[in-house]
Amino acid sequence: MARHLNAAVAPRRSRRRNGGQAMVEFSIVFLLFLVCLLATIQAGFWALDNMAAVTAVENGTRIAALPLQPSEGGNPASETPAGATGVDAKVVSELRAGMVSTPVVVWNMQWDAQMPQQIGGPAATGCPTSETWVLWAEADGLIPATGAAVAICSTYFPSGSTMAIADCPQSATGCVQVVVVGYARLLVTTSIVVLGLGQHCVLALPHLGMRGASGQFCTQGFPIFDEATVPAETYTQ
Amino acid sequence: MRRLRRQRASGGQAIVEMALLFPILIALVFNFIAIMLQVVAAAELQSAMSLAASSAIQADLGSSQGVVLAQEAFNATFKQGLTQAAPYIVSVSALKCTGDYLQGIETSNPSQPVSCTVTVVENFANARIPFIFWKPTLTVTAVAYPPPVRYCGGGAC
């Protein structure tokens, strides 16, 4: 009798065990598949953000290289050089339209001018590098806590300027530089950062008075950096 | 007994199948990422070349400064903007710019552009991305048209 009962119950029990095992296997397999899928989508978004940055930088550089119009304070008689000022505002809407959910900010040049003195670095060279971006992202309250944002910045270097960068084209009219720098927003912040991807840390110096001043400050996101430098144009050249 | 053996055999089948398929899945993902990197590099290269060609026509007609400006604009844009963060770019050829304007030939034909070309070789094995071994070569050409005030030597054509 007992043998008969066991024979009737055993297949049901093993079917239940099989069901549970399939569920566990499926969850493992699905998790791996999901990670791959998210990585692919993230790469696509990063590429889109980068393309938007490249387009914005190119257009911004072309605008910046042109001389200021008289209505903008330019003077054809004195050959007022390139109008780097105001370029950010002209290009930022284009950049915002192209970015996939990554916020866009305009680089604060006044803050940048103080920055090299604060960190004891060389003279100000205008637009930020990735590292100065991270420091600024931490110091400025406008940037999201994750640091996932890009900044647009444009600078004019007059000919023979002591601030001229090494790669400034040797034009008699000086050169203009436009930079988009920052970090693309992550789709799934926590899971990717746990894997150690998309995290960028710099040493925050104590005398900057920033959060995390005692150690490293980290931002999250995949880096975006694009820069263009061209000779400035004047009315006749 | 036979049923029990079949059950045991099918247990973990999904895991084994996944173990076989996972490397292929990972390879697909990394190849997709590499394609994205290449697309971004190509866009950056095209943008840098376009700005270089535009810079070349900022020098006076026939001035050797045109090629210098183009090269410097290209270096400052492409090399600074991309290669510092892109170890997969292994070589960038010298920039070649040609055109009647650069040779000092005055022409009344505004359709004669200045043309600049560069070739970049990439090797994704340098990018520490697993499963990617291709070495694509990108050749990009950009043109710029000198404005009439330049190609007519400042006078009306």
Image (cartoon, coloured by chain):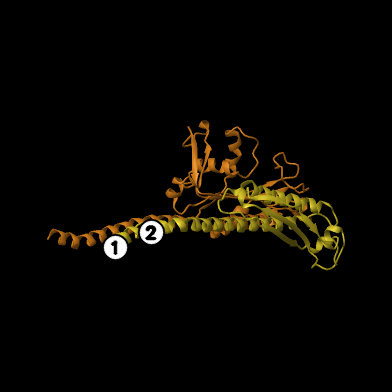
Chain colours: A orange, B yellow
Q: Can residue A123 be seen in this view?
A: yes
Q: Mark 2: give few (<14), some (14-19) or many (20+) Cα within 10 Å.
A: few
Q: What residue type is labelled 2?
A: Gln
Q: Can residue A90 be seen in this view?
A: no
Label of residue A157 in the image: none
Q: Do the residues labelled 1 and 2 touch (CB within 8 Å)?
A: no
User: In the rendered image, which quarter contains the C terminus of chain A?
Assistant: bottom right
Q: Name the residue under label 2.
A: B13
Q: Which amino acid does label 1 sit on?
A: Arg
Q: Mark 1 points at which residue?
A: B3
- Which badge, 1 or 2, comes first in the chain's sequence? 1
At which x and y percent is residue A145? 46, 45
Instruction: Find numbered disc 2 in the image and state the secondary structure of the residue it sits on.
Output: helix
Instruction: Examine the rendered structure and indicate whether residue B63 appears above or below residue A125.
Output: below
At which x and y percent is residue A204? 52, 35
**Mark 1 on the same chain as mark 2:** yes
Q: Is residue B145 left or right of residue A19?
A: right
As measured in the structure, the alpha-carbon distance from the residue carrying label 1 to the one carrying label 2 is: 16 Å
Q: Mark 1: give few (<14), some (14-19) or many (20+) Cα within 10 Å.
A: few
Query: Which residue does the image show at 77% across and 48% down from the upper left?
Result: A171
Q: In this view, does A70 lie to the left or right of B105?
A: left
Of residues A165 and A21, which is closer to you in this image?
A: A21
- The chain letter under disc 1 is B
Of residues B111 and A113, which is closer to you in this image?
A: B111
Instruction: Find numbered disc 1 in the image and state the secondary structure of the residue it sits on.
Output: helix
